[in-house]
Amino acid sequence: MGLGRTLGVGLIGMDGLVVDVEVDVSSGLPAFTIGGRPDPSCAQAPDRVRAAASNSGYAVPQRRVTVNLSPASVPKIGSGFDLAILVAVLIAEGDIPAGVAADVGHIGELGLDGSVRPVRGVLSMVLAAAAAGVRHVVVPVANAREARLAAGVTVHPVAEVAELVTRYRALAAGLTVSAVPEPALADEPDAPIPDLADVVGQAEARLALEIAAAGAHHMFLVGPPGAGKSMLAERLPGLLPPLDAAQALEVTAIASLSGRIGRFDGLCRRPPFVAPHHGASMAAIIGGGSGLVTPGAITQAHRGVLFLDEAPEFRSHVLQALRQPMESGTVVVARAAGRFRYPCRFQLVLAANPCPCGFGFGKGDRCQCSIVRRRSYAAKLAGPLLDRVDLQVLVPVPVRSALLGPPGESTAVVAARVRAAREVAAKRWSGSAYAVNGEVPGSVLRSRRFRLDPATTLDIDRSVDLGTLSLRGYDRCLRVAWTVADLGGRTVPTRDDVGLALSLRHQSGMAA
């Protein structure tokens, strides 16, 4: 009979939580119980722990084994507590010397053969452990490279339970502990960045794409099939500047939690591009799930681009659920087990046909859709959602002469202008909570320091008076105007800049 203690690490949403794992082995009928609000996968740990210990040469005692995961009031989610529970059991039985593992964090799922298997979200867990003062963390070998991205903590990879016990015994005896050999992993080559020069024609849409990249503005593309809407959207991430260290750490942690991290040797420096299918559910887009709460597409697109192709084909309630995350940059998924908060500062790009058949546009209108079908199709995007989209652009089919003309500017050329414009904006907003024009509240843009001359804002003032522009739309036109001025090298927007912002807002004809 004995008591064993060590540390485990779990997740609540994106936030890591250091958990005290306590095991008491006492006399009584054989039982293995876990307290502290384990979810179903965590509650199944006793069977995995017994089999892994037995197949590693150690036996879980046929007595009463009580496991407490503290704090007991917080839900424990996932199988990543397996390794910590087993270590605490072996400490209680004397197989691991007491004290050597008391301050060590353990993360990993157990295989029945005693292997230690990888889990999702290791980067967030290790970051939380480091923030809590834990200086040594044991992780599965497959998660070691990811875990080492966290500063201030020593990562110890482990592949087998028996190997970990041997190392703890050697450590207690004062012997040198050799490092565990890690398998050599070939880094996946970066996917090539699609080049904007591949887009034929579309001068106005290309300009809108550049403005969207420079100011982090949401965008809506409307045009018939084959006009190039998807090509334009896919080239937006290539125009965005690389992520800085803090942003890259956030994005990499989200990729780890989503199971998309793959083989890598560093932080994810590229802005992500996420394009879910139009049949995706609310949980797939916003986040959630009936059991394990996982981040949705809006969180996977954090610091990058969320592209909804064939946007009117998405369920209406899914589209409308985007409104609050677009404004706040965070999403809270409420479940009986608790509230899970995820970051979602994404750039939304919507694409749609002008009507259900796609051919109701411009010359040679071949549409046979009824008025009712057209209105129903447009109504899915009209109103509060579209009012939050800064740029609404018509994308016509290019004329034949555009195929024979010279190619447009490349991604590298446009990205350089975007980077310069962002540097100007960052300097302007330095000392505030904003870095790009698309995040600046209208109250700031209308303040005495940044208020534009009435002659400059005459067009949008008149649109508000006529009721064709909402007050939210007014502020968003100001944001776009500042971005246009930054791209043009002007310190203050002109009336032409404001007029361009207004014209790019109402082109789609689908705004409410």
Image (spheres, rainbow, N blue to C red):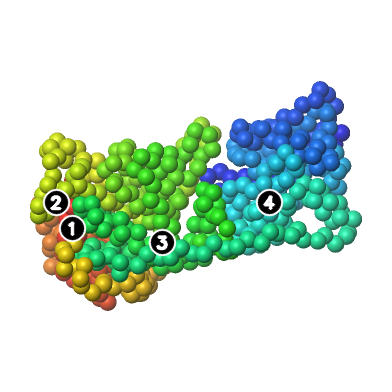
Q: Is residue 224 above or below residue 284?
A: below
Lower sequence index among marks 3 and 2: 2
Q: Secondary structure at mark 4?
A: strand
Foreground residue among 426 and 304: 304
Mark 3 = which residue?
433
Q: Secondary structure at mark 1?
A: loop
In contact (CB < 8 Å): disc 4 and disc 1: no
Q: Residues within 10 Å of mark 3 (few under 14, many from 20)?
A: few
Which residue sits at x=88%, y=60%?
Answer: 175
The mark closer to the camera, 1 or 3, is 1
Residue 181, image x, y percentages: 74, 60
Gap in Å between the C-alphas at discs 4 and 2? 56 Å
Residue 466, image x, y percentages: 10, 52
Q: Is residue 204 above or below residue 79?
A: below
Lower sequence index among marks 1 and 2: 2
Residue 138, image x, y percentages: 71, 52
Gap in Å between the C-alphas at discs 1 and 3? 38 Å
Residue lying farthest to the bottom in this orientation: 489
Q: Amino acid at mark 2?
A: Phe
Mark 1 = which residue?
396
Gap in Å between the C-alphas at discs 4 and 1? 52 Å
Name the side, left or right, on which 425 lies relative to 70.
Answer: left
Mark 4 = which residue?
140
Q: Is residue 50 above or below residue 427?
A: above
Q: Locate the C terminus and report the quarter of the image it occupies.
A: top left
Lower sequence index among marks 4 and 3: 4
Residue 171, image x, y percentages: 84, 56
The mark closer to the camera, 4 or 3, is 4
Gap in Å between the C-alphas at discs 1 and 2? 8 Å
In the picture, the disc for residue 361 is 2
Foreground residue among 479 and 107: 107
Lower sequence index among marks 1 and 3: 1
